[in-house]
Amino acid sequence: MTRFLSESLQAPEPFFRSALKRLEQAHGNPSQDIRLSTEVQRLVRGKLPLMGLDPHDTTPEELYHALQERVRADDARLVKRLRTIAATHISLEADVVAGMVHALQHLPIDTQCYALKPASLKALIKKQPPKKAMKQLGYRSLDSMLKHEPMASIMAAAQLCEAPSWYKSLTERYKKLSPTDFEMRTLSISYPASKRWQKLGHSSVAERHHNILSLPELGAVVLLPLPQAAPAGAVTASLVLALHGLNEIKASSTFLKLCQVRPDFGAIVQTIATEEPKLQTHLLDRSVPWQLIQRYYARMQQAFRDDLFEPHISLSDLSWHNVEHSLSLIEPTMHFWQGTPHLALAHGRQAVSLNLVDAALNLCNQLPFEQRINQYFKTSLWHELMLRYLHDDTVEATVLAELHPQLAFSPVAAN
């Protein structure tokens, strides 16, 4: 076990060391921990010259400031690119968020998802009208709002305006939903642009400091306007988080589609609305996010077994797009960030992250070196480590035990 993983993940010891040792022994001691640590160090050294740094003589603080300058320059190019897209395709006064939405909608990625039917959500909303949202958007009646606003926009406005108790009460109603309330359709990416919506969006972003609303049960992402004087890095952070959101919605969609066989399907829908689905495998003494199962099959397509998943989901459902690659399709100079989500330069228990989200958030919040964040790097590193210990038998046993409990003790047909 390498010190780099323990310190970078800020893992509790000796529990992490013990869990990793058991995992290594169970898989024939493949030394995945050492392989990953060595790979991270090699890839970081390869990135340093691209920023004009010496791979043999660069301090953590020098790297941190170089990353800030790299993000600043890339963000300026990205803003220009998105404004050009908006002016060319939308004529919306070169609005950077409008350009962002257009770019996301036209990426060559799979956006089919299993989502709640508008009619089913409308029936729930009629039983529990979002009165504060209606007022903010200038509607005198619920029928008028339902007629003029998409359901994703109504839910987004309700999340912004209503009390938490309203949303909790609505999701309680999700427990009565069944697979007949869902359908396959294209994932929605929208940007409500009316004057009242813009006013609501600006006030919400000023309060919450982010402009992305993800609605996994609806298969929808709603973007809010960014301030005119948004700090450097804010557009990059926003776009990358939206790209992550598309993956997360796709994973939630697959999980729901697979859970059609479960008698507690409605309760699963309720859970999906508020948190990412997890499986209780306890790999490395932690539950495994479903997105890792999704990523595993996207990476190891030859491991997919029809008898385990079909007829509910097929291999095409288990897609996963590389966020940094998708970003570079929008702005080619962002190619530098490919392969960096789980990279960092070791510096005690507070590594210097090369993860683009960390770097952009550090920049737009003007955080000094001593107060830097690296949370997205830690999550990516943890996920990469778990992915390397996932194998066909582990995944299959997990899916059978967690998603099909009625099959947990039944023999599985051989390949």
Image (spheres, rainbow, N blue to C red):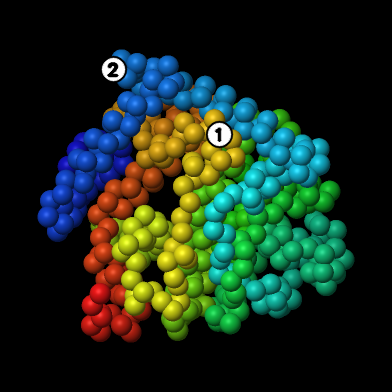
The kind of residue on which mark 1 rests is Pro
* Disc 1 packing (10 Å; few <14; some 14–19; many ≥20): some
**Callout 1 secondary element:** helix
The label on residue 56 is 2
Rendered position, 15 above or below 59: below
Q: Residue at x 82, y 60 (%)?
A: 135
Q: Is residue 14 in view from this perspective? A: no
Rendered position, 194 above or below 64: below
How many marks do you count on the picture? 2
* Circle 1 residue: 332
Residue 126's x, y, as percent? 74, 76
Which residue occupies the extreme right position in the image?
140
User: Which quarter of the rendering shows the N terminus?
Assistant: top left
Residue 146's x, y, as percent? 79, 69
Q: Residue at x 34, y 67 (%)?
A: 304
**Callout 2 secondary element:** loop
Q: Nearer the viewer, residue 190 or 158?
A: 190
User: Which quarter of the rendering shows the C terminus?
Assistant: bottom left
